[in-house]
Image (cartoon, rainbow, N blue to C red):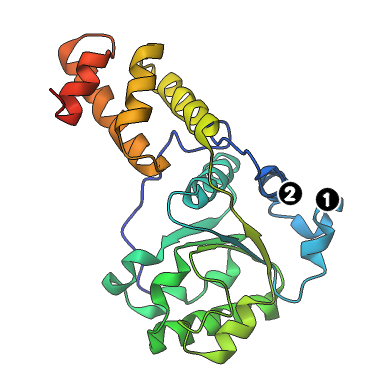
Amino acid sequence: MQLPLPVTLPIDENFDSFVGDGNEEIVTLLTDIVDALPSWRNSSSLGQLVSLKLPLVTLLGASSAGKSHLLFAACHQLANKQVNHLYLNLNDYQAWSHDIFDGLENLSLIALDNVHAIAGDAEWEEALFDLLNRVVETQDTLVLCTSHLGPSNPAFSLPDLRSRLAWGVIYHINPLGDDGRERAVRIRALERGLKLSNQALNFLLHHSERDLKSLMTLLGRLDTRSLQEQKRLSVAMVKRELGIQ
């Protein structure tokens, strides 16, 4: 088995910093999963998963909807509990051998981010199909995936894989509206200890890319600038970072 390079997950992407507007059901499910692992089959709140032939949960949605954030949050909690699990971002799959999936069915949870990345790659689709079959056999492991593509999408060229992916439960992750984005930025700034005036926040929200990933990347850059300049984050600082005169 070829192990991936160690991954450090963003520490500030946890359940506390996730703004769940419209996604409360999946947040509840994931927190129930984390609380129940490794003995998830004994949990009264996870009856839906216990009854599945393949214990698979897929978070489906567009980029920057918060899918990876939820995977990070679950993995952080499992690490704190010392429950064995593995996070793999399949955007990086070309750097690995597909035998990286070997033996993962012995873990309590497998977190596979961006499953759509391997769509159309016959060897990797076959390897994922084989892994899911082993999970069906063991019945001890939970699989948590994110994807831009639903299981029936023809971009997955292996019909048997499309069939297996459809055996799980699918949750559509709703993107945040304007109020939700504002709260998400405020929460992340607070976690970073970043002093953010209302004027600076409003300017940031109205003059940068609107998707959450871009906003958080910009917030990180502003945090660095604020530390370098030893100043509170201001409208003028946001303008300098965005190159606005």
Residue at x-position 48% and y-position 83% = 156
Which of disc 2 and disc 1 is earlier in sequence?
2
Judge by depth and name the residue closer to the eye, 24 or 4. Answer: 24
**Dot 2: within a 10 Å radius of its alpha carbon, few (fewer than 14), some, or many (20 or more) residues?**
some
Q: Tell whether label 2 touches label 1 (CB within 8 Å).
A: yes
Residue at x-position 16% and y-position 13% = 229
- Amino acid type indicated by mark 2: Ala
- Amino acid type indicated by mark 1: Ser
Percent position of residue 187, x then y: 49, 24
Label 2's element?
helix
Q: Name the residue beneath numbered marker 2.
A: 36
240 lies above or below 95:
above
20 lies above or below 139:
above
Q: Name the residue beneath numbered marker 1.
A: 45
The number of discs equals 2
Residue at x-position 80% and y-position 65% = 50
Apparent side of residue 62 relative to residue 245 in the rendered image (left or right)? right
Apparent side of residue 151 relative to residue 189 in the rendered image (left or right)? right
Percent position of residue 188, x then y: 44, 27
